[in-house]
Image (spheres, rainbow, N blue to C red):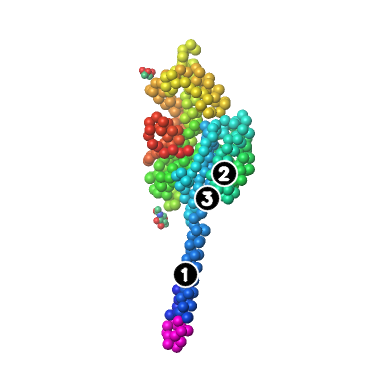
Amino acid sequence: MESAKLQYRPSRSSHRSPNRNSSKSKSRIFCYTSIVFIIAFLCYVFVFSSHVRFSVKRKYGIVIDGGSTGTRIHVFEYEVRNGVPVYDFGDKGLVSMRVNPGLSAYAEEPEMASESVGKLVEFGKQNVPQEYWSSTEIRLMATAGMRLLDSGVQEKILEVCRGVLRDSGLKFMDDWASVISGSDEGLYAWVIANYALGTLGSDPLQTTGIIELGGASAQVTFVSNEPMPPEYSRTIKFRNFTYRIYSHSLLQFGQNVAFDLLLESLVARGHHQAPESVKLMDPCSPKGYPHNLMSLKLSPSSLSDRTRHLSSLYPSGNFSECRSASLSLLQKDKESCPYKSCYIGSTFMPKLQGNFLATENFFYTSRVHIHLVIMPMC
Ligand SMILES: *[C@@H]1O[C@H](CO)[C@@H](O)[C@H](O)[C@H]1NC(C)=O
Ligand SMILES: *[C@@H]1O[C@H](CO)[C@@H](O)[C@H](O)[C@H]1NC(C)=O
């Protein structure tokens, strides 16, 4: 705009001698005024169009979340404003779909994973306009169901998934499909929850911690100012703040796997204490509850264990007994705690501080049984 001002000066100087040639001077004023207007207009067009071209850009991103009981796809539509992605997690900005069972169910026949990932990719492409396909990144992150498998088997299943993603026409690189660490899983949950709550970028003590109960693992992630062993500690810098975060995933403490372990421990304890003829009690299932093995959606190997355990247990629905059996499961290996304090088994955990969100299976369970509203995290 400085150039427009400079251009205006000569027209003022022309006023110094208005009488010499009035009509010539008028036409000059007209001419200068026109130039000023044209320059102002060009400035406006440049500023406006650069705003459209560089400052707000529509984009899509796809994440496939490979959990232990199912595989979910999330398609995000978002804007990049001045280089900063802005997400809207409402109906327009996010669509999701799920297939069962989870990727870990294909341990025996990895090539079968391609069909379920193929279905998800089709859904993804239906929700992204075709002209955006080649610029839309698709990533696959698998969690505890896969972590429980041997690394060779994990890699075979991932390679099948990569084949499908490479052929999808979406933007993909091989290392975008991986089994992520439990610490990263917890950290991502924490970041997204605090982003959605508007607390990412504010005082660390105002942030909200996450307790996430998955199918095969449970994540605990929160800001702590206690000293922490480095393997449990993560640091994130965002805007003016540095967040020191405890993040840990308790493998086998997801809802389904923990329940299996509980039944296993009841059977083991029972066989130790009582003669074979005595029926063993399962205090954590309601009396008369028929366990539907097909609805458990776990991997075939754990299904056979389940059948064995469930068929030898009688559901007795006793809260206090269930509670004490669960607590002793949580205390297992406590004697080998190498830290000052271990809340669960031999896992280090600082004192819980601040607000927490209980997500995933806590949400689904509470929605069914108690009608509490807690935030869902898929
Ligand atoms: C962050 O720091 C900058 C520069 O020191 C400052 O201008 C800004 O107000 C700070 N923002 C917040 C949210 O504290
Ligand atoms: C549950 O188990 C406890 C301890 O074994 C027992 O004292 C209590 O009576 C049981 N409750 C019911 C409702 O059966």
Label 2 Cα neighbours within 10 Å, binned few <14 / some 14-19 / many ≥20 = some
Let me know if residue 165 is in the magenta part. no
| Disc with the residue nearer the chain's start (2 vs 1) | 1
Marks 2 and 1 close (CB-CB < 8 Å): no
Q: CA distance from mark 1 to mark 3?
A: 32 Å
Q: Position of residue 356 (x, y in %)?
A: 39, 39
Residue bearing mark 2: 125
Ligand 2 positioned in quadrant: top left
Residue bearing mark 1: 40
Answer whether residue 140 is visible to the viewer in this image: no
Let me know if residue 15 is in the magenta part. yes
Residue in the image at 48% along x and 78% along y: 31
Answer whether residue 79 is visible to the viewer in this image: yes
Helix, strand or loop for disc 1 = helix
Label 3 Cα neighbours within 10 Å, binned few <14 / some 14-19 / many ≥20 = some
What amino acid type should be assigned to the residue bearing mark 3?
Lys
Q: Position of residue 174 (x, y in %)?
A: 61, 43
What amino acid type should be assigned to the residue bearing mark 1?
Ala
Helix, strand or loop for disc 3 = strand
User: Which residue appears farthest toward the front when viewing the image?
Assistant: 23
Q: Which residues are magenta?
A: 13-26
What amino acid type should be assigned to the residue bearing mark 2?
Lys
Quadrant of the image occupied by residue 115: top right
| Disc with the residue nearer the chain's start (1 vs 3) | 1
Q: Position of residue 150 (x, y in %)?
A: 59, 32
The answer to whether residue 36 is above or below residue 326 is below
Residue in the image at 49% along x and 32% along y: 215
Number of the front mark, 2 or 3 = 2
Residue in the image at 48% along x and 38% along y: 378
Which of the labelled discs sits on residue 59, or is there none?
Answer: 3
Label 1 Cα neighbours within 10 Å, binned few <14 / some 14-19 / many ≥20 = some
Q: Is residue 36 left or right of residue 104?
A: left
